[in-house]
Amino acid sequence: TPHAATLVGIPVFPRAATSAMAFPTLALQQSIHNGSHKQWKHFLPCDFERSYRSKALSAAAPFRMAGNEAAIGADANRHVLGNVWSLACDAAGCRVVQAALEDGDDKMRRLIAKELEGRIWEALECPHANHVLQRCIILLRPSEMHFVFDELHARLRGPTVASQHKFGCRIVKRLLEGGSHDQVRRLVAALLPGFSAIAAHPYGTFVAQHLLYHAEEDQQAAILSEVSATLPELCKNSHGAAVVQVALSQGEPSQTMALCRSIIGVPGLLAHMGCCRHGCPAVIELVGALEGEHQDLQRARSEIVGHGAVLSDCRHGRKLLAALELAAPAAGAGSKAAPRGAAQTANIGGGEASNGGA
């Protein structure tokens, strides 16, 4: 077994060692810690478990605290320094570093963040280190995290690439939340050229929605212009429809009304959206935004009712009809044919749920 730097009784293996190990070995180590390895005992050398646990306990000694093994005090924090990267890349170690960030003072946090310099892209792509980086962004002052923005922008289309990464999108969101005025403006400006592609991406959609919440007024107007330019395509994409919903809720009344009328003006588009997981809430948002605009509201409701047969055939469509208290027309009552691809959209919307959040 490779040498382990252990914290509060949980062995933390250097990344180089863990990446070189076969999966069964890593699984066995995990099962020893959670006590679920009994069915494997017959296949292990007689002294394997005793030897392994002995090494773990020995390595854990500097980090144990009397009467409370889960507590991480100043002594443990001192051992984190100099080992931040190796700990951050480990499932257990990343929690230790996050605890040190939470419990430490400003100086401790700056020292931990310093050890991430030059590794921002590795960190944002790592399933464990991304949590440490997020915690740094949340807890440190914007001026102390300038290197994160610099490394992100240093790569060609860096912010866009990060936004479309499973873990990187979380980092971009935290930067939008916690950056200084100038840092956020620069980041939004870098994301604007690829906004439509970001909005329609399974992970990028979360960043696109965040942009609408955190961009300044002039940049938000530019984002809404991008939404308008590709509105039909975004509405037909479940991820893009989620961005359209936020755009409808965050825009100025005149901008919101223009978006609503553009959507209503495309025959079958409301029904197509209604069959999508994220399109259904967007349609409900649109109908709510049209309250007080009798003519436009009537057009929208008529469009939905006219495609009631299609909507009633899918889960999200039924939710839409119920939310708006609308009934599908009776069979043979002359309801419109399904918009091309609308039936398949219901299945697409359900499948996209497995992509998870950010």
Image (cartoon, grey):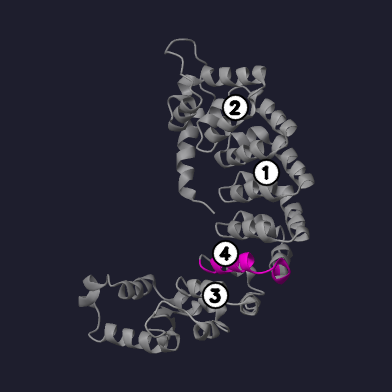
Q: Measure how far apart labels 4 and 1 are at the Cα level.
A: 23 Å
- Identify residue for label 2: 287
Mark sitting on residue 125: 4
Callout 2 amino acid: Val
Closer mark to the observer between disc 2 and disc 3: 3
Callout 3 amino acid: Asp
Residue 89 seen: no
Q: Which residues are magenta?
A: 128-145
Query: In the drawing, does residue 273 fall left or right of residue 187?
Result: left
User: Would you place residue 281 above or below residue 67 in this image?
Assistant: above
- Kindly give the residue lying farthest to the front in the view shown: 67
Closer mark to the observer between disc 1 and disc 2: 2
Say which element carries label 1: helix
Q: Measure how far apart labels 1 and 2 are at the Cα level.
A: 24 Å
User: Would you place residue 247 above or below residue 301 in this image?
Assistant: below
Callout 1 amino acid: Ser
Q: Are marks 2 and 3 in contact (CB under 8 Å)?
A: no
Mark sitting on residue 103: 3
Query: In the drawing, does residue 50 fall left or right of residue 111?
Result: left
Pick whichever of labels 1 and 2 is earlier in the sequence: 1
The x and y percentages for residue 212 are 68, 45
Q: Measure how far apart labels 3 and 1 are at the Cα level.
A: 40 Å
Callout 4 amino acid: Glu
Identify the image quadrant of the N terminus: bottom left
Query: In the drawing, does residue 158 fall left or right of residue 318?
Result: right
Pick whichever of labels 4 and 3 is earlier in the sequence: 3
Pick whichever of labels 2 and 3 is earlier in the sequence: 3
Say which element carries label 3: helix
Mark sitting on residue 285: none
- Kindly give the residue lying farthest to the left in the view shown: 42
Q: Measure how far apart labels 2 and 3 are at the Cα level.
A: 48 Å
The x and y percentages for residue 299 are 62, 18
